[in-house]
Amino acid sequence: MRPKKHGVANFFKALPKNIFSGFVVSLIALPLGLGLAMASEAPPIAGIIAAVVGGLLVSILGGSHVTITGPGNGLVGVLLVAITTLGLEGAYAAIICSGALLIILGFLRMGKLANFFPSSAIQGMLAAIGLIILGKQFHIMMGNKLVMNGSIDYLLAIPNTVKNAFFYQDKGLTYAAIAGVFSLAIMFFYARIRHKYLRLIPAPMWIVLISIGFSYYFELIVKKPHPIDPNYMISGIPTANEIVSQLPIPDFSFMGDLPFWTSVLALTLIASIESLLSIKAVDNLDPQKRRSNVNRDLKALGLATIGSGLIGGLNVVTVIARSSVNVNNGGTNRSANFSHAVFLVIFIVLFSTQLTRIPLPALMAILVYTGYKLASPALIRKIFSVGKEQLIIFFTTLLVTLFVDLISGIVAGVVITFVIHLFINRSFSLFFRNVMKPNVLMFQEGHSDGNYYVSVKHFCTFLNFYKLKEKLDDIPENEDVVVDFSMCEFVDHTVMENLSGYQDLFLKRDGHFEVIGLDLHETDSKHPFALRRLIPGLGLLQNNLTKRQTTLQEIADDYNIHYEAEKTQNAHFLDSFLFFKTKQIEAVYNRLYNTENTFRLFDINYSEGELIAKENVKTTMLHIKLNRQVPEFTLDREGFLERVYAFAGFKDIPIANHRDFSKRFYLLGESTAYIQSFFDDELVHFFESNPYYHVESNGTSLLVFSKERVAGIKEIKALYDFGKRLGKVIQETFD
Amino acid sequence: MNNNQFKIVGIGVAFSPNLKANLYEAARLSLLFGSRLLLIHVGEASEEKKRTIDEILKPFIEKQLDFEIVFQPGDPVEVILKTVLTKRVDLLILGALKQENFLKYYVGSIARKITRKALCSVLLLIKPSIERIPCKHVVVNGLKDDRTKHAITAAFFVANALKSEQLTIVEEITQQEISIKVNDNKSLRKANLMKEKLKRREDLRIQQILTEIPEEQKVQISVKTQPIFGTRGYSIGHYAQVARADLLVMNAPGKVGFWDRLFPHDIEHILTELPTDVLIVQ
């Protein structure tokens, strides 16, 4: 009984944080919802309806914790086809049917569905969707509405549109293009600017706010009509009353037709894949390390899709970008998703007329950026680094999707992957004879508390990965696991990628996940390259040191410490810091460390968020290992933002007799009394009389850094000095 | 030493390149078990054949090997099965085939038919050799089955006769028994608790069987139990391979008649993919 009670109390304690996070998410969801719906040629409000219905239903019925649901970018292509062939009412009928199929998938426990597709094929499909979105919306962004046949035509017309944009006769179109390009620039450069207050509002919302402000500027101050062509303004946003009174009636008359069912199938397939991939990715970000119930989520999404389709909304899927924003803003449970929906309703009720002040190109710029992110060159480079054959799979899927359609694309991807596997192994029987065999053995070595041993036989590819996955999912993530491939003749990229995902997951949750038996493959000529070579590890040796690096080397010599420029993957000493709970560490490099490895200064590259909300940050940090136990705390300078956070449920711990300290610093932690006794006069004076740094403790070590950018030489010296003295003060406090 | 379950050991003799190795293995086992060796040749009797066999078995004859040769023309499967019945053979030794280029073994079609129909225990050898390869590790199944006790007793007998060092009793727990599907943290926790419970239950059952094994058979060997979760029949083979066992002892497949062979049977999995030497105890 006790844990339950605890749960309710925790829920209410975390509620303010979640409402805050839901608010931030709704700031993104609003423009994205409008844009995605318009890109699918549905009425703009359809996207908002999907987000609202999704948020309300899935948050109550779903099985995941920090995900956000709403209209998905993957579905734009399919919805576009559905709406053009079936008409809007017919498309709503297809959406409702796909919702029903999703529920069935949930009941059939097909949460493992996404594992049946090779990951390069899925990447190819997503990239194709990205290009479809980018291709179509780019023209609108540049003030050049086009109607063409295939997605390829749109892409090919891009250079022409860019050229023509400089010669518009109509001033209104030129302004439209300027608004579009300006918005795109905001999307691109937002991630670079790490200003606290600017970052309070997500990039898409800045675009909305600037657009609306601009429009008012013309109306109220300049008193001239808006310079952008009225055709390029959002139109047809109904008021809340109109939405309720003008419910569309889904048209099921196409149900006998083949195109209808192709659409339903495509919608279901993409919706489930997008949702499942997102849930998996978001689970990795969850600071509370929970496991989502995917099948329950599928059912909830299906029900939400039916509901959304009935009142004129799009498919509801789990969306990765918005979910990661949620995690980054402190969302901890489903109430964030719920409140995001509530805020959307509030926006529509209060401001629906304001939305017509947004220029279409500005909104489309958000989508162009989304499309670009899905098909970015960095992604292709990454796939190429895995192996040439993955590139073949990727491009086959991409091109077939672009030229034919989504279903053919993913089928082609699966087929080409299988053909490549046959070709590489030169054996059909390896797959044919063994595909049905239960090829995975798992047991716990010794009795209880021994480590788990998983042995895989024959082959392990996307065809039978689900069997391995089933076993791996049965293991609590804080256990030790050894996966042995020594009896497995062939392991493909999909499996390796998924395993490395497991590896991260287990490490994050205090477990250990090891893959063994693949070194044997190296000597075996039957198995060429990357398909089983890709065990994560960044081995880029930098022989060529930059000026900063040589200076670092000099500092190291000067201070009598060691210096290493190479990237190291062993960044797990950082995992237990609160700061990294929602962040992925990409690499640690340029390390300065003492012989005992208790004092480490390093550059670090980490990312937060996913897709359009993904941001890469490079910064310099200092890690000090203490020789005694200290309380876990986070200390930062107090600012406006912190007061906002405090309002949202984070508590600043006051230190008695040090009003100045409490006013200037923002101190966080679980055990208030322990922290208060830890911050004695000497320590407080130390912090008061030294420059500001963000200082965090995980109980046994300290993490110190100042800015979210790489430090210069002078700053490194200052940081080094600060750390040295801080370590000394803390050490002495106890002695 | 009167608990010998295998009083008469039979082996099919074909004059193939493997003849010497097969005979050596059979003769060695017969000596170790203290059994009588019955050589079954499907074909006409001839002095020459007899002489060849005598020649090969010479070193064992010196050690007082008790053996007999049966010549009987006809269909190999029928002849062997019939002889097994009439001569009351307790253990039939069959050789397995090696898959080309791979270190994989499977049971040929004739041997497979015999294995399915034989009413005696069957020993499938993956690589008969002239030199004796020590059998260090015996794995035996601990299924919840009436025959399991018999199989474990046999395993102890063989392990003692072959002077094995280790004997592992594998408790296979099928996925179906864990009725809880893992969805999230809560169900995962429940499923793991259930697994623990099942493990304890199985372990208790095995310990019960172990108490009935005579002490003198247990002293020389380190006995271990290992619960595994997987498909019945198949996973134990996989385990034997992983644990680098030298001999896998299994229950004979249930019921007379094999009309349900269409659905992969416990033994069928093993026959297509022999992990080690396999002893099927009838």
Image: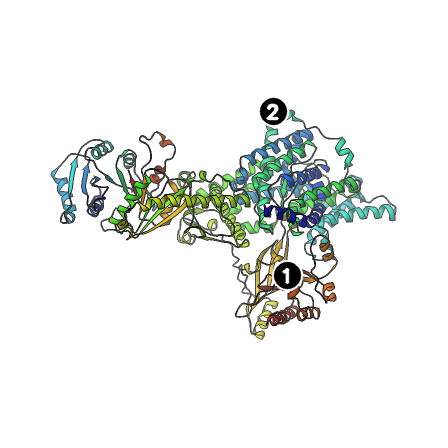
Residue B156 placed where, x, y %?
Answer: 28, 47
How many marks the image carries: the answer is: 2
**Is residue A307 found left or right of B105 in the rendered image?**
right
**Residue tagged by mark 1?**
A633
Q: Tag 2: residue type?
A: Gly
Residue occupying the point 38% across, 46% down: B239
In the rendered view, would you say B2 is above or below A654? above
Residue B273's quadrant in the figure? top left
**Residue designated by label 2:** A256
Please give the chain letter of the residue carrying mark 2.
A
**Residue A425 visible within the image:** no
Residue B202 in the image: x percent, y percent?
40, 43
Where is residue A523? Give x, y as percent. Answer: 40, 54
Which quadrant of the figure has residue A126?
top right
User: Is residue A163 depicted above or below A264 in this figure?
Assistant: below
Colour scheme of the rendered structure: rainbow
Q: Nearer the viewer, mark 1 or mark 2?
A: 1
A735 to A360, vertically: above or below: below
Hey, what amino acid is under mark 1?
Phe
Report the side of B199 relative to A618 (left or right): left
Marks 1/2: CA distance?
Answer: 63 Å
Sequence-first disc among 1 and 2: 2
Q: Secondary structure at mark 1?
A: strand
> How busy is the neighbourhood of tag 1: few (under 14 within 10 Å), some, or many (20 plus)?
many
